[in-house]
Amino acid sequence: MTNFTLEPNQVEPGDKLVKLMGWSCLSFLLAFLINNFLNIYFGLPSALAVLAGTASNLFVPGSIYLITFAAMTYFFVYKSDNTLRDQAQNLHSLNKFLIRWFFFSILFVGIVDVTLAFLRVEKLLPLFFHEEVIGSFNKPIFVGLYIHMPIVFVAFVTSFFSKTLGFTWLALMIVLAELLIVITRFVFSYEQPFMADLVRYWYAGLFLFASAYTLYDEGHVRVDIVYAGLTERTQGLLNAFGCWVLGVSTGLTIVIIAFNGKFSIINKPLLSFEVSQTGTVGMFIKYQLAVFLGIFGITMIVQFISYFFESYSDFKGTGKKRTAGQSVAH
C-alpha cells in the first residue's frame, strides 16, 4: 500500500460540517445494525417497524439511534482534532481490519466445512466420532453455532496479528479448488456437490469483500475521458458528490432492505442457518452467502465515507493527496 504523509492542518468549521455528515451516516449504520440484532434475537422493536406502523414502542430503538449519534458526534466531530484525511485513513484502516477478519473467516470455515461434508458423504464420520456426535454434524444449527461461530472468533483474533488482506491467496485457493474438481471429475470420475459449494463460497467472498478495497485503490473500471481532463479541485467535488448520490445511497439501500425484519433476505437464513437444497451432501454455508451481501453493503458505506472525506480535502486543496497504490499487499 502506498504511504503518504499528512500535512498539519487546522480543523476548519467547514470540515466539522463534512465530518458531521459522514459520522451521522455511520452512526445511523451502527445503530441500525444494533437495533437489528436486538430485534431478531431478543424481539425488541425495530425503528423501521415503528415507522411502518407494525410496532408502537419507539423508546428502545429511538434511544439506540440517539445515543449512537450523540456518542459518535461528540468523539469524532466535536472533540476530534484530526483532519479529514486523518479520519479517512482511520476509516480505511477499520475497513481493512474487517476485510481481514472476513477473509480469514471464510478461509477457515471453508476448509473445515468442506472436510466435514466429505466425511459425511463418504460415511467416514463413524471412524472419528460417536453416534450422537455424528447426528449433530448433520444438523446445520449445530454446525453453525458450535463449529462455524468459534472459527469466526479464531479468525477475528488472527486478523489482529496478520496484516495481509489475502485477496491474492484467496484467488489462488479458488484456482486450486477448481483444479481439484477438474482432476477428480475427469481422472477419477468423482464429483460431489460440496466441491462446487466451496468454489462458490470463496468466489462470493473474493468479489464482495474486495470491492471496498478496490474503491480505495481506485481499481474499479470507469470511463474517465472527461474526468481525467478536469482539475484536481473539480475532480474532488465530483467524487464527493458521487460518494453520496451513487455510493452511500446504494450501500444504505442494500443494508436496509437486507436486514429489514426477521424474514428479510439476510435475517431469515441467518436465524435458521439455512443450507442449500443439496442438504447433508453439501456445505452448510448458504446462510453465510446471504450475510456476504450485508458485509458488502457495510464495508462499501464505510469506504465511501472515507472517500468522501478525502474528496472534500482534494476539493479544498488541504493536505497531501494520496496516490493510489497498485498492490493489495500489506
Image: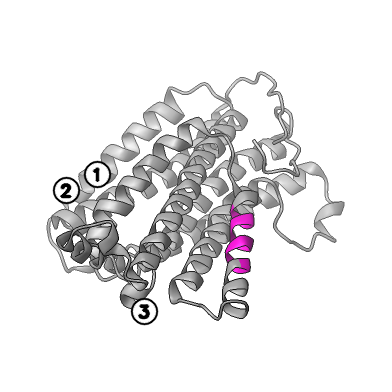
230 or 260, which is in the foreground? Answer: 260
Q: Are marks 2 and 1 in contact (CB under 8 Å)?
A: yes
User: Main structural element of the magenta stretch: helix, strand or loop?
Assistant: helix
The span shown in magenta is: 170-179
Q: Nearer the viewer, residue 87 or 17?
A: 87
In the displayed structure, 99 sits above or below 41; it is above
Using the numbered discs, state the Cα–Cα distance from disc 3 to disc 1 in whole angstroms: 40 Å
Q: Does residue 156 appear to the left or right of 10 in the view shown?
A: left
Percent coordinates x, y for residue 274 in the rendering: 30, 70
Q: Quadrant of the N terminus?
A: top right
Residue 105 appears left or right of 266: right
Q: Earlier in the sequence, mark 3 or mark 1?
A: 1
Residue drawn at x 62%, y 31% is 85
Q: How is the image coloured?
A: one colour
Q: What residue is rendered at 46% in x and 32% in y? A: 160
* Location of mark 2 (residue): 60
**Secondary element type, mark 2:** helix
Place of residue 311 in the rendered image (x, y in percent of width and height, measured from the top left): 66, 42
Horizontally, residue 230 falls left or right of residue 135, namely: right
Residue pointed to by mark 1: 64
Q: Is residue 232 above or below residue 52?
A: above
Residue at x 17% of width, y 57% of height: 45
- Marks 2 and 1, how far apart at CA: 6 Å
| Amino acid bearing label 2 | Val
Q: Amino acid at mark 1?
A: Ile
